Amino acid sequence: MPNPTRIEINCETGVESIIELTDAEVAELAYQAELAAEKKAEEESAKAELEAKKQEVLAKLGLTADEVTALLA
Amino acid sequence: MANTFELIASSTVGAGGAANITFSSIASSWTDLCLKVSVRSNNSDGNVYDQINLFFNNVNDFTTKVIQGSGSTVASYQPSGSGVQLPIITGNSATANTFGNFEIYIPNYAGSTNKSFSIDSVNENNATTAYSQLDAGLWSNTSAINAIKMQPSVGTLFLQYSTAYLYGVKNA
């Protein structure tokens, strides 16, 4: 099975080239995707944690988010 | 304010997808650059979105401020350094045949000062969950930008029919 390709457009000549990735580039791509997935999972987790804390505060105050919005309006 | 748009180059991803799209040998003839992109990645991690790793002159090292909203929650954060994931795009768990859109505007891209830029992006999804994102970025580099590369962060391919259009903008 051939490796994936990349697209390079030379803006000076207007020539578009479709170039097959080398094995090293494919390995690097997989590694970078793995790192990005980890980073994305961390960000999602941080967002969920923040949201949970907000809900916790609202629960302690005995208010809903809509009620807080109305109070601040 | 720059007011004349000229298409420098464009590309449409063919069958089989593309790992990245690069605009190279960008001349310094314009005042600003504007990149308009519609893409979908093969990310299928269960989230409806993916992000982009952006490179100027093959360097991915930015300082950014990000606001990301889903319609019910909003997050504000400051990713920086290498490996920064910038515009949000549509991943392969989103509704079939939807594509995320983003625009990158780079004023004074050929100047000899650090380069600021802005990005607005959305991941299209014909369902409840969808995101929009605004990025304010700084590339601390005084070189003229002569190459822009973008690749999916979590996915490994842009899917067929993804498109990218690079415009040069002049202020006269």
Image (cartoon, rainbow, N blue to C red):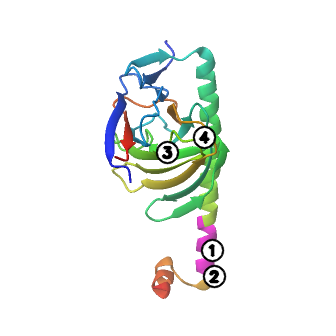
Q: Predominant secondary structure in magenta?
A: helix
* Disc on the earlier residue, 2 or 4: 4
* Residue where numbered disc 4 is placed: A37
The residue beneath circle 3 is: B108
Looking at the rendered structure, the secondary structure element under dot 1 is: helix
Residue neighbourhood size for the residue with mark 3, other residues' Cα within 10 Å, grouped as few (<14), some (14–19), many (≥20): many
Q: How far, Cα to Cα, is label 4 from label 1?
A: 28 Å
Q: What is the secondary structure assignment of the residue under circle 3?
A: loop
Given the image, what chain letter belongs to the residue carrying mark 1? A
Report, in whole angstroms, how far the alpha carbon at label 4 lies from the one at label 3. Answer: 33 Å
Q: Which chain letter matches label 2?
A: A
Residue A60's disc is 2
The reply to whether residue B153 is visible in this rendering is no
- Tell me the kind of residue under disc 3: Asn
On the same chain, marks 4 and 1? The answer is yes
Specify the subunit that label 3 lies on: B
* Badge 2 vs badge 1, beta-carbon distance below 8 Å: yes
